[in-house]
Amino acid sequence: AAALLTACGSGTVGQTGSGDSAKPVGGKKLALIPGVQAEPFYISLQCGAEAEAKKLGYELTTQAPQKFDAPLQTQLVNALGSNPPAALLIAPTDDTAMLAPIQQVKARGAKIVEVDTALKDTSVAASSVSSDNTAGGKLAAQTMAKLAAGKSGSVLVLDTIAGTSTTAARAKGFEDELKNTPNLKSIGVQFTQNEPDQAAAKVTAALSSTPDLVGIFATNLNTGEGAATGLRNAGKVGAVNLIGFDASPSEVEGLKNGQYQALIAQDPASIGTQGVQQAVADVEGKAVTRNLTAQLHSITKADMDANSQYFYKQSC
Ligand code: T6T
């Protein structure tokens, strides 16, 4: 009930055009169900999706769970009911648990497009649009190696919740690539349940168990925020290199004041735009591309002004 609900009217709600007898399921309605509400990555994605839907003459309605949580997201998917939209754009919060509810919507006739995260079962969605998250993890490892500048030490990886396809791919890409830098050794991937407090506690524990800790890779916004808190509490800001994923206003502020040494920014608006394009193509019986990616950018304090176009939005 507390989910965020916004609609972008196109003036064509429920219509398929005059004289159009073959009305597809859901008319010109699209539904977007992001991973979590009131969060700059998904807000920016929604902004891109809404603008594109409007351009193409579709109505896009967004409902997001209060937390990045499969049971909460399942309720929203189930609430689409027996009259689903023409297409559902969704960021599955769990690569397995979200399979059954999404399949049910598909069985009722809605086209399925994954935005950001994806299901393990690749047969459900017509199209998946995301960052190349494995490449993002690699980019973070290469940036970590550059920042270490030959210094030896240990590195901690903070993941979110097991079953999150995006952050899992980032962590794996990072660990695989780090093997090419023999002076840096990963002490492993730790899960934080996407809670900043848990990320902070993991950092506090790692600092005391691993005196040679020289770097942390935080695989998303909340893990980064928590890691920054952990380093601040221990007086280790700047002494341990922190690389975050995403470019929320608070992360950008953290980059500016030295809490992060680098951010890997995604292009969420482009994921939303491309997601709607694929959904509409599928609804209209046109060719659909199974996998599409959006650009990633490694940003440091030195080049942040030149990269401000990649910073996420709090509202459209
Ligand atoms: O990093 C993004 C998103 O790509 C990921 O799937 C979940 O976390 C974020 O939404 C950031 O909080």
Image (cartoon, rainbow, N blue to C red):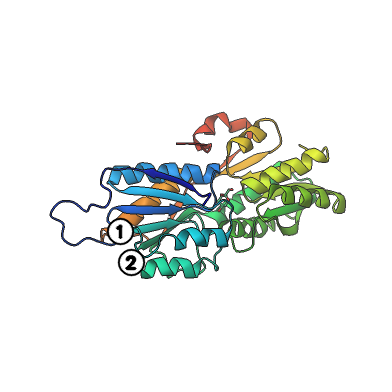
Q: Is residue 85 visible?
A: yes
The residue identified by callout 2 is 109
x, y percent for residue 34? 49, 52
Residue 292 on image: x %, y %:
42, 55
Determine contact: label 2, label 1, CB under 8 Å: yes
Q: Could you tell whether 33 is left or right of 220 in the image?
A: left
List x then y, in percent, for residue 66. Answer: 57, 50
Taking 288 as reference, is 124 above or below it?
below
Pick whichever, 203 or 182, lies toward us.
203
Q: Nearer the viewer, residue 224 or 297?
A: 224
Q: Identify which residue is drawn at 67% across, 35% down.
A: 254
Q: Identify the residue at horizontal 22%, vertical 60% (top origin).
A: 23
Judged from this view, the residue extending furthest toward the left is: 19
SS at mark 2? Answer: loop
Q: Earlier in the sequence, mark 2 or mark 1?
A: 1
Q: Tell me, yes or no, if residue 165 can be seen here.
A: no
Q: Nearer the viewer, residue 143 or 28?
A: 28
Residue neighbourhood size for the residue with mark 2, other residues' Cα within 10 Å, grouped as few (<14), some (14–19), many (≥20): some
Q: CA distance from mark 2 to mark 1?
A: 8 Å
> Residue placed at 26% from the left, 59% from the top?
286
SS at circle 1: loop
- Number of the label disc, if any, that sits on residue 26: 1
| Amino acid on which the number 1 mark rests in the picture | Gly
Q: Nearer the viewer, residue 10 or 43?
A: 10
